[in-house]
Amino acid sequence: IIAMKDGTIQREGTLKDFQRSECQLFEHWKTLMNRQDQELEKETVMERKAPEPSQGLPRAMSSRDGLLLDEDEEEEEAAESEEDDNLSSVLHQRAKIPWRACTKYLSSAGVLLLSLLVFSQLLKHMVLVAIDYWLAKWTDSALVLSPATRNCSLSQECALDQSVYAMVFTVLCSLGIALCLVTSVTVEWTGLKVAKRLHRSLLNRIILAPMRFFETTPLGSILNRFSSDCNTIDQHIPSTLECLSRSTLLCVSALTVISYVTPVFLVALLPLAVVCYFIQKYFRVASRDLQQLDDTTQLPLLSHFAETVEGLTTIRAFRYEARFQQKLLEYTDSNNIASLFLTAANRWLEVRMEYIGACVVLIAAATSISNSLHRELSAGLVGLGLTYALMVSNYLNWMVRNLADMEIQLGAVKRIHTLLKTEAESYEGLLAPSLIPKNWPDQGKIQIQNLSVRYDSSLKPVLKHVNALIAPGQKIGICGRTGSGKSSFSLAFFRMVDMFEGRIIIDGIDIAKLPLHTLRSRLSIILQDPVLFSGTIRFNLDPEKKCSDSTLWEALEIAQLKLVVKALPGGLDAIITEGGENFSQGQRQLFCLARAFVRKTSIFIMDEATASIDMATENILQKVVMTAFADRTVVTIAHRVHTILSADLVMVLKRGAILEFDKPEKLLSQKDSVFASFVRADK
């Protein structure tokens, strides 16, 4: 056994050595072990007293086995039918394009920017078609005919004046370049504006979300919304949207030109469109699932690689290199299989789009040749139609693939909008800030009237009809077993839980009528796990920069941290790392105590603040509370019952209700009191 104190080894040896030489330390360990044994014994007794299920119940029910079997079969059939309906509904939903998410994305850009985007895209492709049409017309006009046919004597006189064609072609090309630039800028501008607006809305909603949201939503899910999903909206959706609109408009332009050159092509266009629709519908579902499979198999691969690099010394020490290498190869194979199938699906689509494109070329060529034989159709227009027909397969392929990518990426918009539906806390109160005294609460009188509290409207109450009166300056201790409602009691003061019945009145004002920011800024609390932020000691003690240095040093002296801070380079400007890792657990808690003293609030709450610190720091904490906070109302939620023996009043909670509420001396004098049993068990 190694015993440590102040970062140094105090003594080491066996348990018998400590028993002989360190009697006081050994007795302290013995007390802690006895306390743990008693708690374990109580839990064992409670488990034994729990009612066991009756052994005769199955026998009594056996006479109805036949009837129950029939009912079970009917229920199974109904369940199977319902599952089939649900499956078909899910498949139908998966095959649908998420138009709602697309609408939400585009609406976030604003009407003006969205109109500019649509107009520039349409105008750009109209100009591109006009350029190709003008080239076809120019080609037809440039056919060199014999001088006799053109009724001119010199070939120079028969030469075509190309200046007009060149000038129009130059103007169209310049306009096309300008529109391409405008379109690209508009797309990027749209993506930037949408990303900023969604990120700002999401951040505001998360900041204003109630505490229940953070308890029920995994932290990783929230971080993914801000990292992965925001990155998708910012980086990927704009480029995919631009590619999708370009390939779609190019495909429509090609089919329009072919139909203009040979109107008979419209007859064959309908069946080709139907075939293309079913192919893209089938491909999109498979592509989305394969993309998700690729993402899910990539995450274990990256995690395993990072963990291997981090623990490489341990792996080599145990000679587990081959085992981790094999695991890495397995994860790589799984990810490669998913990626291979995704590539195969893209090739599957490409082959079928090539078939449709070949049909388009065949029909366009046949109809063009037929029309040129039966009516005058210029060679330039025939060449224009065939040129566009050759590109249809490529346009269709990219249109479907971009549509599938857009569908996957719009899932990020959908997930963010789901979080945006989170109901925010009511920060606005019924009382205007001007009606609230600046020094409220100045006395610290607390009236709790028929208070009932729950964490959510769908959950049972955790506090039931609690009534109490706390006079100004009183020290109140609250104790009870796990789940009795102690922490919920402290959360009720800050309106972090749903107070659906009753009220808490502090110095004559109902806290439910106060603006939330005002309420929380006028009370102080120390939690079981101390909270320190990365920054200077000055910032952690006084984030709002309202106090002088002398006040901060006074607070540190009261918390017995003055010498510690003075020894640091920079003093009050010394840096605290993230979470206060450069200080011990007890010192962090004392910093929180100093911060509470600086705030000068008349009500001070300690929620099991001594549960995770050593006995010496606990004694300092108790001494400061009794001296520096002597004129303030202190509510202490106790993990160790002996810490509230000096309190003015003790409240014992059980299953959300007050079981006992009186002076500790009076409760200890009653042998059958629950508080007395807690004290006896804590010795």
Image (cartoon, rainbow, N blue to C red):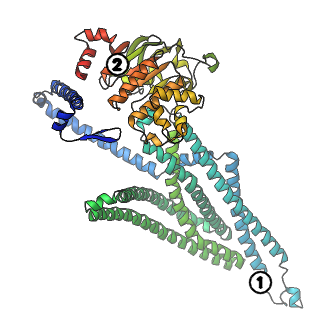
**Secondary structure type for disc 2:** helix
Q: Horizontal placement of 643 versus 74: left or right? A: right
* Place of residue 596 in the rendered image (x, y in percent of width and height, measured from the top left): 49, 26
> Image quarter for residue 500?
top left
**Quarter occupied by the N terminus:** top left
Is residue 377 at all visible to an observer of this figure? Answer: no
Q: Residue at position x 42%, y 16% from top?
A: 451
> Image quarter for residue 21?
top left
> Image quarter for residue 254?
bottom right
Q: Amino acid at mark 1?
A: Leu
Q: Which residue is mark 1?
A: 143
* Place of residue 88 in the rendered image (x, y in percent of width and height, measured from the top left): 39, 48
* Place of residue 508 in the rendered image (x, y in percent of width and height, measured from the top left): 53, 11
Of the numbered discs in the image, which one, if any, rests on residue 292?
Answer: none
Q: Horizontal placement of 418 versus 258: left or right? A: left
Instruction: Relative to 617, say whether 116 is above or below.
Output: below
Q: Which residue is mark 2?
A: 644
Q: Residue at position x 70%, y 47% from top?
A: 112
**Quarter occupied by the C terminus:** top left
| Separation of marks 2 and 1 at Cα, in angstroms | 106 Å
Instruction: Relative to 79, say whether 343 is above or below.
Output: below
How many tags in the picture?
2
**Secondary structure type for disc 1:** loop
Q: Amino acid at mark 2?
A: Ile
Instruction: Relative to 506, say whether 25 is above or below.
Output: below
Is residue 290 at all visible to an observer of this figure? Answer: yes
